[in-house]
Image (tube, coloured by chain):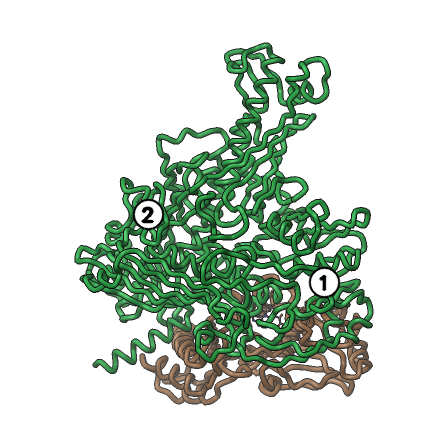
Chain colours: A brown, B green
Amino acid sequence: MKPAQFEYVSPSTIDAAIAALVASNGEGKVLAGGQSLLPLLNFRMARPAVLVDLNGIEGLSYIEDRGDRIAIGALARHRELEHSPLIASKLPVMSAAMRHVAHLAIRNRGTIGGSLSHADPAAELPMLATFYEAEISVQGPSGRRTIAAGNFFVDALTNCLEPEEIVVEVEFPVLKQDGWAFEEVARRFGDFALASIAVSVRRGPASLEAARVAVMGVADTPRRLREAEDELVAMALDDTTPDRFAEIVVSLVAPNDDLHASADYRKHLLAQLARRALRTALAMKG
Amino acid sequence: MSSDRRASPSDVVRPRNVGAPIKRTEDPRLLTGNGEYTADRKPDRPLHLAFLRSGQPHARIVRIDAAAARQAPGVVAVFTAEDIADDFKPVVPFSRMPNYYATPILPLASGKVRYVGEAVVAVIATSRYLAEDALDLIDVDYEPLGALARAELALADNAPLLHEAAGTNVLIAREFRKGDVTADLAAATVRVAGRFEMTRKAPLAMEPRSYAAEYDKRRDAITLYTSSNIPGIVRDAVSESLGLSGHCMRVVAPDVGGSFGSKGSLYPEELLICIAARKLRRSVKWTADRLEDVSSSSQAFAEIVDAEMGFDANGIATSLQADVIGDVGAYSIYPWTCGLEPVQVVSFLPGPYKIGSYRGAVRGVATCKPPTGPYRGVGRPISTFVAERLMDLGAAALGIDPLEIRRRNLVRAEEFPYRIASGIIWDKAGFIECLDAAAEAAGYDRLRKEQAEARKQGRLFGIGIASYAELTGIGSRIAVAPGMPINTGSETAKITIDSTGAITAAFGVASHGQGLETTLAQIVADDLGARFEDVRVIQGDSDEVPMSTGTYASRSAVLGGGAAKHASKILREKIKRVASHLLEANADDIEVTEGKAVVLGTDRAVSFKQIAKAVYSDMKTLPVEAREELSATYTYDPVNGTTAAATHIAAVEIDPATCFVRILKFVVAEDCGRIINPMIVDGQVHGGVAQGIGAALFEELIYDEDGQLLTASLVDYMIPSAPEVPVMDVVHVESESAVAGGFRGMGEGGTIGAPAAIANAIADALSPLGIGVSILPMTPERIFRLMEQAQIKRKADE
Ligand SMILES: Cc1cc2nc3c(=O)[nH]c(=O)nc-3n(C[C@H](O)[C@H](O)[C@H](O)COP(=O)(O)OP(=O)(O)OC[C@H]3O[C@@H](n4cnc5c(N)ncnc54)[C@H](O)[C@@H]3O)c2cc1C
């Protein structure tokens, strides 16, 4: 279990990193926290000729308050997001979700850029990006562009980046909300989620004015459930709302059977979590 | 993690060290990273080995093209079975058991491969990286012969044969019988039955298997450093296979990072690395990576048991029958044979109970998987799971409390020694005492009340009990597996005081985490009259220690400890004789204590150092005939061995939302005889129970229909981590055994009782839904499906 041979470069600027990727003729790979990439290298499932280490680039690790948006540099570690007071106050769903990401040692190294790029269907940050409608800024040989999170995740472990593009920043809009919840079930503490849901609500006089719902672990990519949001807003709120919501949520997903859980079990879990999450969100004093 | 509520029997007089919770001598070095494991060896310019392993479950090897690999950078040699054909004799796991076929063990697959993960080609290069690069360049043409993915399929008439020479896929078949089971079952008031399954496990030691064959040019000799818990057996087997005399074949097990049985058999890689070192006249190293360790180290359990138990109206179990199919994998292991695991299931199935008649039949069936071998508990986690499920089913059918039905069936104090229906003889041990102590510690009556409350609220709360007994410290009259050409019945201690007065105690029993350096030193210190910190225990080096089969089967404290006691006493007499000269006193008036010989009732004393000087260095003080070497060797054989017993009680709650099982309470009351070190005993119980929790709730090696391992990494092969292991309460019922020191073996018990207790607790929790437990692990997925089925059935019934 040793990686195949590769060349290692450690540029100090984004431009130099992109140049190194260009020079590698499509054989290059970016290294951030290494928590997902190194196992792939060791199993020889990834065999890049050049490893471009981003860790020497200054100024890529920040959490910045931009008023109605929070900007996070690609190299910000999971642990920094978990403990940021800014994120706790402005992006509370993210704050709650981060402690479910892997184990301490992994959170110390893993980065937001790496997690989004790796695009694991049961990973928290891709789901949070989807939930918040984050904008992902990427830089490549032809400059910088911004990709909506909804378009970024293409399939399990597949994003829409060009081979020479690097994620440099992620911007999360701050949600106007009165209540929210994040729920997840994993087999053991720190394992990837079997099912998870994030919910945010804004109350109106009789019903909800707005709702936001995203799920993960139940499809090849994290998913925002707009139909569920619309139905929730259209619903009259009463004791049966959480049950009805859970039914709607489950009707919108079609997970696969895999080693860790059957589709039916994942749907069962999601229904439980949806009910619980909505109850929590509705009960929250805004 | 445990509250120690040890009962202190009045008849136990506590010596100074034995019985004390002395901190483990080995821990400072192991916990500060100063241990020396096999992979830490730094021989001169070592070469590194990598194996090309089969991706095919069962296939003829048509052609191997390794030409490109031989030319690859850094590659020194590439070996296939053909290249080494003349360098060894196959090792045959011989046994005189009838209906047994011994599959020969070869260093590399020859002719065909029989499981995914079997080593086919060995590449030796200047680094592991380069060796693995060269693996990519090897082409093997295979002609598939059909996977045997499950034992039941391998039993079919038209199934392909894994070993043609055996003529069958059934590598071992045995039957135990006593009385007329058919008649007793027919006469029973209540009959309960089930088809039970314990899936395959990986023993998963923290240190993967690791070997370093160090070549000594001057003598054309090899020292094999191996992460083995049976270095003595490995030495003899490799020496025989390679035709090397013992003084050219030294085997050392240095610090070993756990085994749980997975390092307790001879491995093909151990043969291959020695062959390579010899052919190349260079030192060669190999450490399995986690993938190799999970997919090629011996695996565990994997049985399906059809069993039935009959009870009379009073809840006395009268009869028991079982048909066991063991999925033993592709080969029989050396020296234990493929019978070890499945045969133990039928020989221990009646457990600690006085069941009148019995029929237990077992077939060990070859499949395309790594061999099963020893794993903490061997066979008994399954036999206990089955017997304890049947006990609970019987209790439910008769309306008797599970605690009470066990009390009625356990062998009672006055009935020992007791021969159970499978033929095993239990010597006196605290069966009922453990049951009562566990019930008391768990607050059993209170738990039942809590359960009644919980049920009123619709909560799924369950209580499970498991009682078991095991044979430990087995002596020469009972072999670990019958008819093997090795002596598992005795152990030797050699204790020496050198010319500086330092004490070295050499043991053949090897240590791989049990703390034997500490416990054996405690015994020596007490029986020799030395200070604990002055005793150095050495193990695992064939040049330094007496011949031994190693540490396994909960034997080392009993056999090694017994040898330590006897050898210490012999040496103490020598010390007294010398001291009597030096102190001009009668030897009978001398007491040896704290590293000194003292004339009783006086302050006249000589230290071991002074005694050693007089014996070894001083020509004047002692007459020549009194200068006996300060050394004693004793070989101890407990003849029968001794019984260890325990009762485990688990209380669990199942969350219907997630189908997760939460262990609310876990109590172990165990009788391991005289306790040498209570802290180590607690640690062994905790670790054993943690592995039992793994077996009950998490761990499962899944092979698909093509024989491919789907759970080859620790992401997919789930083991309990700290948050999944509850605080446990360990109660020690300390009844001395009849062997030297009064010890009983206790390294495995935790893993034997826990799966059954948890299975019963889950079944109890789910009983309002009409759900039983017949397979382990009970994963959330399985619980979910059972609950779904129960709901469908309930709806249909309405
Ligand atoms: C045992 C274990 C458990 C885990 N459990 C969880 C969990 O529960 N939840 C969870 O979310 N994650 C989990 N992870 C994954 C962890 O969060 C990783 O940190 C994350 O997936 C990848 O981040 P990284 O910075 O380590 O990326 P790396 O491993 O360095 O890279 C991952 C991939 O992204 C690419 N990449 C990295 N940075 C960039 C960039 N800026 N631009 C473009 N491409 C880039 C790399 O080329 C590579 O393909 C777990 C990991 C382990 C080892």
Q: Nearer the viewer, mark 1 or mark 2?
A: 1
Q: Is mark 1 within 8 Å of ligand 1?
A: no
The residue carrying pointer 1 sits among few (fewer than 14), some (14 to 19) or many (20 or more) residues within 10 Å by Cα, namely few
Instruction: Determine the residue positioned at 75% across, 57% down.
Output: B277
Residues at marks 1 and 2 on the same chain:
yes
Residue matched to label 2: B419
Give the mark nearest the N terminus, 1 or 2: 1
Residue B24 falls in image quadrant = top right
Question: Mark 1 belongs to which subunit?
Answer: B
Residue A242, percent from left and from top? 36, 79
The amino acid type of the residue labelled 2 equals Arg
Using the rendered image of the protein, determine whether residue B191 is visible from the camera's viewpoint.
yes
Left or right: residue B662 versus residue B137 is left
Return the residue at label 1.
B86
Query: Where is residue B167 drawn, in percent x and y?
Result: 50, 71
The amino acid beneath tag 1 is Asp
Q: In this rendering, would B743 be left or right of B525?
A: left
**Can residue A111 be seen in the rendering of this structure?**
no
Where does the C terminus of chain B fall, quadrant-wise? bottom left
Disc 1 + disc 2, Cβ < 8 Å: no
Residues B650 and B274: in front is B274
